Image (cartoon, grey):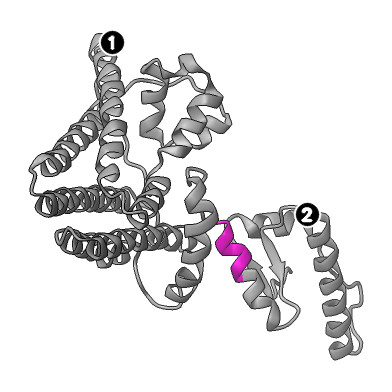
Amino acid sequence: MRVITTRLFADRNGLTQFLETVPIVRSEEASGDIPNLWRRLYEQFEASCRDGWRAKVEARWHYLKDAADIRMSEQIFLRRVGKPQDGIVSKFINRPLSRPITRLLLKFPIAPTTWTLSISALPFLSCVLLLRGDYAGILIGVAVYQLSSMLDGCDGEIARAKYLESKRGGRVDDFCDLMGGFFFMTGLGFGLGHAHGSAFYAVEGILWVLIMAANEFLLRIAKLETNLGSTDLTGALYPRHRQLIEHSGVLFFGERFVWWLLQLTKRDVGILFFLVLALAGLAPWILHLSLAIAAPGLLLTGITRIKTRAHGRGAVAPYSHL
């Protein structure tokens, strides 16, 4: 008979690892002082858990010696529910800020998609503030957008913590992120256009929206098999972006260059940089730089799409949960 103590905290794949690491505690005594027997078994089990945990460098389970260990175990667990595709800002700023919120949300029956939809109002609020076009409106609007980017990590953390990952959740999250970007750039473009008395900024915002819409459409209909091995580069890519990197020709510049290019142009990095530009009073450069990055991205996606048609193997690209 095996007894699993309730003091065991096991995260994803942790129970299997625990059973493989910690030896079985048993007693050969057939009779005797039962209370003392259970006490000795408990002491042996506790010692085995301590030794097994120390021996396992990446232990995915913890033996809770007392109530004080609960918080530590939860923090370690939440640090593991991030994604390998996280950008620099998500990894070192957004995730550390979102984890305490996720830890609180996990105490309630909140589904990941419910959280995704509940924070989708923030980009719209950001758009309303940006439409003012003045320094305060733009700064607060960009700050709200950065807040939505940080809170956007909670839905994925909840999904991975509760084993609720789904394609539907990924689709909803992708759509909300895309619409959030549309609201943000449109609000900023029209706000700056109103403040400067020029339609140029509004045209920039609308053009960015059209480019991103076309890019997303092409990404979802273009599909080629990829032969990228398991590297730091592939770990930083969502499945639907691997074909883009491999077949667009950008790898001509080398994997290290492409890795850094991806890191510096990820959504989380861009939004934080937008906040820096807004603080510096350089909000128009948010539009200029966004358009300068989006246009080549559409070109690369178009090249991949052309190769897809040449191979005659078009298919719907998979969604990935953000």
Q: Which residues are magenta?
A: 74-81
Residue 152 location, quadrant = bottom left
Question: Which numbered disc, 1 or 2, marks the residue that appears first in the sequence?
Answer: 2
Please indicate whether residue 18 sits to the left or right of residue 203 in the image.
Answer: right
Please indicate whether residue 187 sits to the left or right of residue 287 in the image.
Answer: left
Q: Which residue is mark 2?
A: 56
Q: Amino acid at mark 1?
A: His
Q: Which residue is mark 1?
A: 311
The structure residue drawn at horizontal position 89% and vertical position 81%, both measured from the top left corner, is: 40
Q: Amino acid at mark 2?
A: Lys
Q: CA distance from mark 1 to mark 2?
A: 48 Å
Q: Give the main secondary structure of the magenta stretch.
A: helix
Residue 43, can we see it?
Answer: yes
Where residue 283 sits: x, y (%)? 28, 50
Using a 10 Å C-alpha cutoff, classify the residue at mark 2 as few (fewer than 14 neighbours), some (14 to 19) or many (20 or more): few
Instruction: Tell me, yes or no, whether the highlighted magenta stretch contains residue 204.
Output: no
SS category of the residue bearing label 1: helix
